[in-house]
Image (cartoon, rainbow, N blue to C red):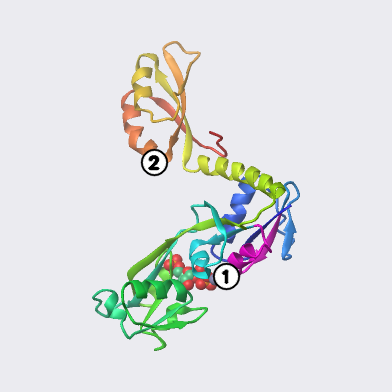
């Protein structure tokens, strides 16, 4: 049995549970106890505050954890990064009141900065040779300049709407962050083989992301040209239609390349183009 620490609520919770579900791992959501066992895969989920996940993995309370890179780097706990998960992307930035002029990191010299990420911030200030007064608070960092508690803040920015609604502007991006799968450094062989199966499934889900299954009808004399336009990994499937002179062409492409080639396909006479989502993909 592998124990995975996940955030009990907040930024990462939904995407984490969706990834587990897409990987075919059933976790009952009605039972909101601290520890919930999967009904069809040898894992149990330990729900924690994100701040506590790195330590729980480093000490072996949990074997794995899904946590924001921001939290992992800030805590400085000794655990392995097993895989970057590509969701919950955000950045850790410095922000100051909108109307104030800014002239680079030196602006913060002698200023008071409110943050929940003192270690990352201190490192950045040291690197830039700036002496600032770092003031640690755990919530609602963004309101501190407005109430005179600090001159600037250092916090997570995602959409940026929290900054806008507090009349702040982002002046330095210090680090980018996304969800990480982290692991204890000494995992038993038995747990390692469950982890390998889990990674295989995550890989299949991730490979399918942003990929589409595309099928279309193409006049036989245009098949060669259509195939040349399609960027699929392997060569596409071409099958004759019942109607003479037409073929069905199937392939897998990136969603964004689809928008680049669609007009070319229509020009070549492709018709009845269908674009379908792909759930899993094993390469
Ligand atoms: C973070 C941060 C901001 C907000 C920024 O809080 O402290 O309040 O997100 O996001 P935005 O740019 O999309 O407005 P979060 O919701 O992660 O809660 P936490 O600080 O308690 O972890
Ligand atoms: Zn937090």
Q: Which residues are drawn in magenta?
A: 44-63
Circle 1 crowding by C-alpha within 10 Å: few under 14, some 14–19, many from 20: some
Mark 2 residue element: helix
* Residue for badge 2: 256
Report the residue at 35% width, 77% height from top. 167
Report the residue at 72% width, 66% height from top. 34
Mark 1 residue element: helix
Q: In the image, is residue 55 part of the stretch drawn in magenta?
A: yes
* Residue for badge 1: 51
In which image quadrant can residue 77 be found? bottom right
Disc 1: residue Cβ within 8 A of ligand 2's nearest atom: yes
Q: Residue furthest top?
A: 244
- When the figure is inspected, residue 276 is found, relative to residue 190, above or below; the finding is above
Q: Residue 258 at what x, y percent from top left?
A: 39, 36
Whether residue 7 is visible, yes or no, is no
- When the figure is inspected, residue 171 is found, relative to residue 204, above or below; the finding is below
Q: Residue 122 at what x, y percent from top left?
A: 41, 76
Total labels drawn: 2
Report the residue at 35% width, 24% height from top. 228
Q: Residue furthest bottom?
A: 148
In which image quadrant can residue 183 be found? bottom right
Whether residue 118 is visible, yes or no, is yes
- When the figure is inspected, residue 13 is found, relative to residue 265, above or below; the finding is below
Q: In the image, is residue 23 part of the stretch drawn in magenta?
A: no
Q: Nearer the viewer, residue 163 or 152?
A: 152
Question: Going from the N terminus, do you reach mark 1 or mark 2 first?
Answer: 1
Q: Nearer the viewer, residue 129 or 273?
A: 129
Q: Nearer the viewer, mark 1 or mark 2?
A: 1
Disc 2: residue Cβ within 8 A of ligand 1's nearest atom: no
How much space separates mark 1 and mark 2, taking CA atoms?
A: 36 Å
Q: Residue 163 at what x, y percent from top left?
A: 39, 73
Report the residue at 42% width, 40% height from top. 255
């Amino acid at each position: 049995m592998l124990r995975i620490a996940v955030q009990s609520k907040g930024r990462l919770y939904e995407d984490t549970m969706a990834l587990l579900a897409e990987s075919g791992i059933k976790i009952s959501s009605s039972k909101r106890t601290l520890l919930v066992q999967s009904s069809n895969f040898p894992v149990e989920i330990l729900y924690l505050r994100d701040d506590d996940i790195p330590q729980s993995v480093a000490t072996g309370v949990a074997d794995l954890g899904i946590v924001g890179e921001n939290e992992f780097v800030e805590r400085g706990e000794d655990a392995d990064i097993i895989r970057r998960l590509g969701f919950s992307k955000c950045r850790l930035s410095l922000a100051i009141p909108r109307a104030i002029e800014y002239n680079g990191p030196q602006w913060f010299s002698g200023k008071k900065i409110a943050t929940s990420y003192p270690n990352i911030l201190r490192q950045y200030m040291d690197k830039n040779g700036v002496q600032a007064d770092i003031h640690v608070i755990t919530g609602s960092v963004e309101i501190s300049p407005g109430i005179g508690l600090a001159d600037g803040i250092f916090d997570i920015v995602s959409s940026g709407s929290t900054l806008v609604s507090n009349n702040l502007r982002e002046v330095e991006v210090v680090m980018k962050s996304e969800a990480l799968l982290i692991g204890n450094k000494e995992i038993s062989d038995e747990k390692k083989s469950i982890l390998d199966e889990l990674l295989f499934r995550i890989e299949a889900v991730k490979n399918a992301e942003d990929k589409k299954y595309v099928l279309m009808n193409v006049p036989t004399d245009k098949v060669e040209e259509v195939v040349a336009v399609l960027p699929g990994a392997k060569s596409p499937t071409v099958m004759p239609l019942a109607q003479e002179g037409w073929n069905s062409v199937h392939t897998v492409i990136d969603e964004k390349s689809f928008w680049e080639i669609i007009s070319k396909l229509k020009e070549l006479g492709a018709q009845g183009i269908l674009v379908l989502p792909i759930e899993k993909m094993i390469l």
